[in-house]
Image (cartoon, rainbow, N blue to C red):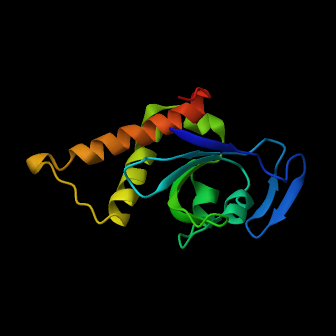
Amino acid sequence: MIIKRLKGSKYKNKKVETEFGTFDSKKKSTIHQFNPVIYPRILWVIVTDDPKDISDKFDSECEYKSAFDTSKAFVLKCTEKDSGNLGICVCFRKRKFMNGINTIVHESVHIASCIFDDCSMTMGFSDGRDEHFAYLVGWAADCINQVRTNKFK
């Protein structure tokens, strides 16, 4: 379920100096917010080439500067500054990096792991304890795919 689509970066159409380096912000950044309903975390799917879009909107104890420089996508636990909502950001540096089931599923497993960790949930195959994890991975992958295809439920 999508809650809202947030407007793109205020740094559009210019080069931006940040603590992470210089970024060309001609491409529109997007942030989509999803609510898993039964878990007390929000998922934000972000497409941006500007790390300032993350630091302006979210607080995080995770170090993502190096991930931004070396990864196509990354996941971090965060808190939305305006609302105080706790959640998970999955950031794709470019929309084309969302193409491919491997990357989508890979990041979805990280998302599910973060939520399980935050909720002190355990996962294992015995007694069907992996069922919640499997559904959560599928939900996260579906959210990313909705952003990838620009077709929302």
Q: Decide which of 64, 83 is in the foreground and name it.
A: 83
Question: Above or below — where is 100 with respect to 137?
Answer: above
Question: Above or below — where is 68 with respect to 136?
Answer: below
Q: Decide which of 97, 8 is in the foreground and name it.
A: 8
Picture coordinates of residue 13 (x, y %)?
Answer: 89, 46
Residue at x 21% of width, y 47% of height: 130
Residue at x 9% of width, y 48% of height: 127
Farthest bottom residue in view: 61
Q: Is residue 11 left or right of residue 75?
A: right
Residue at x 74% of width, y 55% of height: 50
Q: Is residue 81 left or right of residue 111?
A: right
Picture coordinates of residue 88 (x, y %)?
Answer: 50, 57
The quadrant holding residue 128 is top left
Picture coordinates of residue 60 (x, y %)?
Answer: 57, 69
Picture coordinates of residue 73 (x, y %)?
Answer: 55, 49
Question: Above or below — where is 140 with respect to 51?
Answer: above
Farthest right residue in view: 14
Q: How many marks?
A: 0
Q: Decide which of 48, 34 is in the foreground and name it.
A: 34
Q: Is residue 96 left or right of residue 124?
A: right
Residue at x 22% of width, y 55% of height: 123
